[in-house]
Image: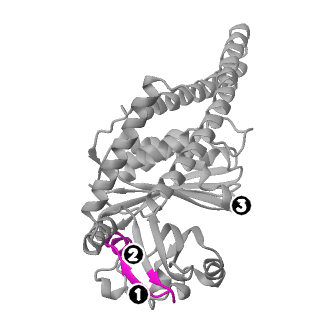
């Protein structure tokens, strides 16, 4: 067989490396040096390591393992029984006993270890464990070595990535539905404005002209609300949504909102302001608080065909005010109450609107340092509320 110069160079290089390895091993020829080398590796390896004797009793553990399991002193952990570990259980124990090597990935509960060893940790840890039997020269099992890796951070990050992916996919579907719906929401009031404007110009009847004018005004308001919602959403998305705080009377604000929206309620529905409102001064963005109340009242108007809609507030404590809009409308099923504040969500596709009002209201309340929510029963009505700091 012919060899090339490159083959000969490679062979000489391997011989040189083998000689270097032999010289290095001779440096640690004594048992004492070997133990020192082992101890250095044992203490510095970036995983938890536990060593058990042939009866499954823990005889040594490294620092990384102690830190992982919240143990301050090695003495608090030595002597525990591998085969009676409450987190491993009988099924895994049988597997360990019958196999030379075992590997488990599970949630390790520190609540189960209270009588097993003393730990400063609580809750659970996502643990990857590998256990291997150690054999003597005669082939007899002389112990076990366990290697542990805390996978909690990686597991949480993985779950966060999965959740973020699902949210992104859902948001993408909602945006696609929103864009498809937006053409209808814009075209409907525009068609009404154009159509009834033409009819109003062609009629000499005062009653008809007044009726057409009211229809045009209603559709103008609907179109303006839609445009404002889209603009607010764009500001929120771009981070340019700002608030300007000032002192104002929340009672006057509630009255203003009720008066401005009184003509929008359905026949037979009373829109009123609650009685005996407390006297106080709120330091916040009056325009934005008014916008939130108007959104909540407008939402109530859509779904209340009879009964009443009540706007009011109360002092939650000395530092917070609690606004509410209660109606006697259709109500919201419990499993859909959290979804109403999500963007582009419409529980009733036959009701006019972009599905942005409640989401924008939540963003405004968050920006003002408050919280928002809903309490509702199907068929009994709903109460939308939000709290804000007084100052």
Asked if disc 2 and disc 1 are in contact, CB closer than 8 Å, the reply is yes
Specify whether residue 281 is in view.
no
Q: Quadrant of the C terminus?
A: bottom left
> Observer-nearest residue: 102 or 194?
102
Colour scheme used in the picture?
A: one colour
On residue 117, which mark appears?
1
Point out the frontmost of discs 1 and 3. 1
61 part of magenta stretch: yes
Q: CA distance from mark 2 to mark 3?
A: 49 Å
Report which residue position mark 2 lands on. Answer: 69
The percent position of residue 236, horizontal first and vertical second, equals 43, 35
Q: At x 62% / y 28%, what residue is drawn?
A: 218
Report which residue position mark 3 lands on. Answer: 378
Q: CA distance from mark 1 to mark 3?
A: 52 Å
Vertical side of 192 occupied by 27: above or below: below
Tell me where residue 149 sits by quadrant.
Answer: bottom left
């Amino acid at each position: 067989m012919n060899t090339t110069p490159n083959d000969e160079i490679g062979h000489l290089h391997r011989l040189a490396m083998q000689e270097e390895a032999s010289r290095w091993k001779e440096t640690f020829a004594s048992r004492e040096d070997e133990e020192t080398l082992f101890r250095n590796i044992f203490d510095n390896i970036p995983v938890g390591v536990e060593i058990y004797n042939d009866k499954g009793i823990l005889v040594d553990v490294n620092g990384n393992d102690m830190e992982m399991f919240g143990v301050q002193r090695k003495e608090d952990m030595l002597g525990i029984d591998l085969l009676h570990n409450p987190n491993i259980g009988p099924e895994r124990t049988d597997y360990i006993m019958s196999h030379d090597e075992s590997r488990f990935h599970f949630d390790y509960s520190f609540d189960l270890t209270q009588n097993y060893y003393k730990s400063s940790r609580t809750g659970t840890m996502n643990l990857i464990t590998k256990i291997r039997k150690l054999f003597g020269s005669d082939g007899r099992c002389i112990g076990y070595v366990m290697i542990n890796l805390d996978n909690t951070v990686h597991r949480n990050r993985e779950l966060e990535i999965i959740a973020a992916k699902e949210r992104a996919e859902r948001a993408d579907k909602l945006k696609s539905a929103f864009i498809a719906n937006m053409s209808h929401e814009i075209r409907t009031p525009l068609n009404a404005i154009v159509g009834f404007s033409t009819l109003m110009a062609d009629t000499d009847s005062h009653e008809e002209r007044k009726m057409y004018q009211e229809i045009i005004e209603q559709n103008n308001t609907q179109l303006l609300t839609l445009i404002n919602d889209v603009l607010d959403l764009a500001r929120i998305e771009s981070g340019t949504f700002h608030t300007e705080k000032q002192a104002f009377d929340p009672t006057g604000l509630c009255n203003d909102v009720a008066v401005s929206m009184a003509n929008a309620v359905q026949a037979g529905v009373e829109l009123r302001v609650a009685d005996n409102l407390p006297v106080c001064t709120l330091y916040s963005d009056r325009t934005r608080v008014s916008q939130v109340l108007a959104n909540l009242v407008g939402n109530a108007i859509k779904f209340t065909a009879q009964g009443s809609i009540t706007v009011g507030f109360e002092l939650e404590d000395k530092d917070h005010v609690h606004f509410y809009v209660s109606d006697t409308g259709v109500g919201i099923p419990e499993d859909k109450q959290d979804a109403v504040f999500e963007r582009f969500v419409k529980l009733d596709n036959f009701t006019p609107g972009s599905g942005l009002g409640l989401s924008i209201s939540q963003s405004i309340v968050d920006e003002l340092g408050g919280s928002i929510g809903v309490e509702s029963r199907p068929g009994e009505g709903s109460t939308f509320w939000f709290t804000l700091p007084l100052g």
